[in-house]
Amino acid sequence: MSQAFESQSFNLNVNGVDYPVNVEMDRNLLSVIRTEIGLTGTKEGCDDCECGACMVLLDGQPVNSCSYLAVQAQGRAITTIEGVMTGDEMHPLQRNILEEGGVQCGFCTPGMILSAHALLERNAAPSEEEVRIGLSGNLCRCTGYTKIVAAVQRTAVELRS
Amino acid sequence: MTPSATAQATTRRFVRADGPDKVTGSGRYTADLSLTGTLVAKFRYAQVSHARITKLDVSAARAMPGVFAVITDADVPDVRFGPMVQDRRLFARDVVRFEGEIVAAVAAVDAETAQRAVDAIVVEYSPLPIVNDVESALSPDSPLVHEDWADYGAPGVMVRNRNDASYASIAKGDVDKALAEADFVVRSHYESDGCHAAPIEPRAVVAQWEGNKVTIWTSTQVPFDARAGVCETLELPSSRVRIIVPHLGGGFGGKCGFHYEAHVAALARIAKRPVKLVFSRREEFLAPDKRREGIVYDFETGVKADGTIIARKARLVIDNGAYTADAGFFSQLAAMHALGPYKIPNVLSEAHLAYTNHQPSGSVRAPTAPQTCWALESHTDEVANKLGMDPVAFRKLNAVDSNVEGPSGQTYGEIGVQQCIDAATAAAGYGKPLADDEAIGVAIGWWPSFASASGAYIKIDGDGSGQIITGAQECGTGAVMTLRQLAADELGMQPEDFELVYQDTSAAPYDMGATGSQTLFNNGRAVIAAAGQIADQLRELAANKLEAAAADIVLADGMAHVAGSPDRGVAIAKLAATAANGELLIGHGSGPPPPAAKAVGNTCVGDIGMTAWRAPQFSCHAVRVRLDRETGVVRVLRVSTAHDSGTIINHTGAQGQVEGGVMMGIGQALTEGTKYDDQARQRNAALLEYKLQTCADAPPIDVQFVEIYTPDAGPRGAKSLAEAPNVATAAAIGNAIAKLVGSPVRRLPMTAERVWETINAGNAS
Amino acid sequence: MSFTIAHTVDEALAAMAAGARAIAGGTDLVVGARHGKAALPGNLVAIDRLTELKSVTTTKDGVSIGALVTHHDIEMHPLLSTSYAGLADGSALVGSPSTRHIGTLGGNIMNASPAMDTGAPLAVMRAEIELRSVRGSRRVPIEELWTAPGKTSAQPDELCVAIHIPAPATRSNSAYVRLEYRRAMEIAVVGAAAFVALNDDGTIAALRVGLTAVSPTIFTGDLVGQIGRSVSDAAENAAKVSMEQATPISDVRASDSYRRHTVGVMARRAVEAAARRAAGETIAIPVNRAIGIGAAS
């Protein structure tokens, strides 16, 4: 069962920075981001593609990093929640989710923001239904989603103007 | 408590203090922490539901390279613990009683090595008969889950007998006579499955010893309770145990109680390294002694032809699981919910808490309430149907009201249940025509407020910035965040002027934790008291400076000024600078909890928790659903809620509690339920098979508050809030489904297949 | 033990000939390994960068979909989401938005799960799978590809490079519907796809039904007996045949009797939706979220 995999050395580009890593072939991207690269904003909630807490962007597309091999992410641009801000300034999604009251325990929040980010990249004017489907891979147990959806819609309006 | 003379309530929205950490990913949760040399902990679980341990050999695991500690019952003090019934040990001794019971724990250099060591532990069992359902657990010939139950320590008021870990009853009037005199008697049977809190953050614990003191970072809702558990089981004084909670990723009751802090601390002590435990989602489903209890219900209600309820009998059997944890008082809570917020002159409500070989039950958001409300309110609609009365009119007629006696004999002062019914049904458009596959169901619910000792300090530094140092625990609800608002209002400052130091048992005074919706209710009082001490200091300082009487100084907008003369003032920051060279601005608050409500008559609820309900909250939910009659799939289209939780202090936060509670209620109603195999093992311990509601399922939710200033309650006439919104949703959904199907679905969750079966049963008859 | 990234199909085939297993998005492999379904193969060749397998091309016979076209691409594709609508219905329901971005049609097919959402629609459209190896290339009718849950007739060194779907005749189209307990993040409890061709008078000219999650592999039936019948009769008969032909199991998601009943309902709905599309009506992708209980409200 626990077959030992060889380590491989490669670079991972996370939030615009190249990180040399040396990890086993079977390591998932989530654990490498959290452990080797040291960015803990990406969370592990289920390890099963069912909760979305581990969401990152890979070349702008949302990916459950719990079920993606780290070796396979080499040569691609990885964005985590830590890469969403511009300098010290929050992305409008971050600001709006905060101001709308869409954050409670906060554990789903980074993944939720990245899914919303990807959604708005491909659809600048999503309907409420499109927002709800776009965020459907991110479970939130606290908010009932209402204020999160409102924050994404508000952001879409802001970014368009 | 009367309204503070000087407080100006903040009405503008403000951003929660922990929010920036959470949206930027910089906030640290327990699993995010690492200390030099940290080892990984893993548990060996029983994996069988009831068996005697015939062999336990850890020698091979201990001998493995990279393994620093392997511990079992033999390596920890001989302590049996439990907050109500002392029926549990850290590690199984002789017998395992549910699949998630811990037999041994390992600390190793990495997860793979730890897992190999866990697998190398040799355990052999001889099977014992499995108790897999609550009704048979109470039969006189049932095997005992605990052979030695009679020897266990427990409060004297608990009524225990064999597998019945706690019996409670509420009796009033002469129920049999009244049932005989009723024009109609309706009898109903319901069953609810257990379900899970399922916070998105799986729990994690990190423990590190320095000398003879241990610091434990843990994802608990109740740090002081966790500390008490460590002290009890490892036989340590509280001064040598420090519990720190980093950001907490949700709890919903699931992270109440004392969990794995002692296991990890014990591993760390033996390994002489920091040790970290992080649960997988599967462990999160199987192991904790906190999941919502399944219940079996029988109701019998007698009514007069005019619609008046004159009698109710209820019998409930609650699934306690293998250990009692904090569920000892569930029988009294459930007995109360079985009566509901109705004025009934003759009642007999009885509830049993039955041991089984299931995962232990424990507090999950309003324990016993949502499922009992679902059963009772389904029954209530059956009674209304029998009478040919509109179910809302029937509720209006029979619901408790201000200064009217409730079912246990208690009256509740000024309450808003009738207004809640009016507001929720109006928002839902109740009574208006609907498509033939749609219906609106209505339910009312209630939930008490819990009083407890609670403390906080406040200090204002020389630059005028403040810190609130509180024992209170933030689990996401925003209750701790709102403390800033209370302090600011007392001191004429802004919420943003305060930082919070919290979730550290060695820094702050006691608080019960994020449990029982009690944080703002109790710690709010402490913060107001602490701020009041500083306000007095500021008034003295200002009085000297302004040559006025201290009693005439008003604190507002960051200034201390003479009443009636806004321009005769001095900035609070300036006074703080003055104080920094003399008597420092430090306040502390605690004070006695509000007086207990008076117990009336033979309420006889066992006295474990409270003999009478304090500041009960009321709610009405009206839910419009659509039914696919061919498949039984139900969709919730809109939820209209109204809540009486007294004064609302933070409206944004309060709305969030209602919206989240409703969403959890929809899950409980339709998709969330534990399934057991014939060996009492969970069949759906994963998020694909245990289905939480997604963003795509979430309907619009109307939130209305019936705000009534409530004396002898929380700050500013507030009651509690966080659990109450979870109570009535599933019940309202059930009543809507029953309208469409023609009879209620008698098992919760009302899965598509169960709805379909109910439709079929109706077609067949 | 090796992990290599292929930059051309030939590189990938060479690696597979040397024993490597192809990995595209990898979700099924990684999750499967974690659950002990099958250990992660020791030798992997990443094929996710093979741009030659990422295009959708129209041919004289129909359409060829590169194996690495993602579910999201299919859902959004102007041709696939109209003329091959049943496939787009299925792709739009797969997993979560992220799974649809990372998950490929080829990966879904080769995983050979009886619960896969794209299988039944491809089967009723008589898709062929192009398998290539260093030994050459061959086309397999999709129903002959699946042999058992998780098993295909492909050789270990064969790479699925494309899915070919014949062009639908005029007045024909397809639809896929599935039973869902929630509106997203579902796996098919049961599902049904239908391909319908209509005569000028609106009666059935051809009808094929495919069923998801009610037999060890995707079940398909050619309902030649329904030719010439009205759509409503044919839909009822399709429901009946589906219920009879299904061999569902009882598991944690549903009982066999509930599956048998609901697969009939799904079959009827799939036939009705496909017929409406065949008649020229636009039903948005996916049917599950356009009409009925899952529609946006």
Image (cartoon, rainbow, N blue to C red):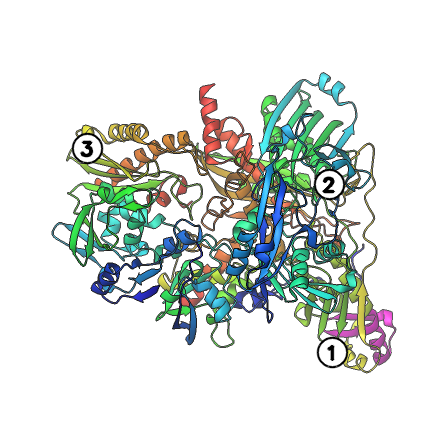
Q: Is residue B541 covered in magenta? A: yes
CA distance separating discs 1 and 3: 84 Å
Task: Kindly identify the residue that appears in the image at 80 percent across and 81 percent down.
Answer: B578
Give the quadrant of the N terminus of chain B.
bottom right
- Name the residue carrying label 1: B573
Evaluate whether label 1 is on the same chain as label 2.
Answer: yes
In the rendered image, residue B750, in percent from the top left (x then y), is placed at 51, 35
CA distance separating discs 3 and 2: 65 Å
Q: Are marks 3 and 2 in contact (CB under 8 Å)?
A: no
Residue type beneath disc 3: Ile
Q: From where the camera sits, is residue B374 visible?
A: yes
- Name the residue carrying label 3: C204
- Determine whether, in the image, residue B285 is placed left or right of residue A159: right
Tell me: residue C240, above or below residue B661: above
- Name the residue carrying label 2: B329
User: Dot 1, how many residues are within 10 Å of its Cα: few (below 14), some (14-19), or many (20+)?
Assistant: some
In the rendered image, residue B372, in percent from the top left (x then y), is placed at 64, 35
Residue type beneath disc 1: Ala
- Determine whether, in the image, residue B246 is placed left or right of residue B179: left
Which span is picked out in magenta? B536-562
CA distance separating discs 1 and 2: 49 Å
User: Can you tell which quarter of the image residue B386 is in?
Assistant: top right
Tell me: residue B581, above or below residue A105: below
Residue type beneath disc 2: Phe
Q: Chain of mark 2?
A: B
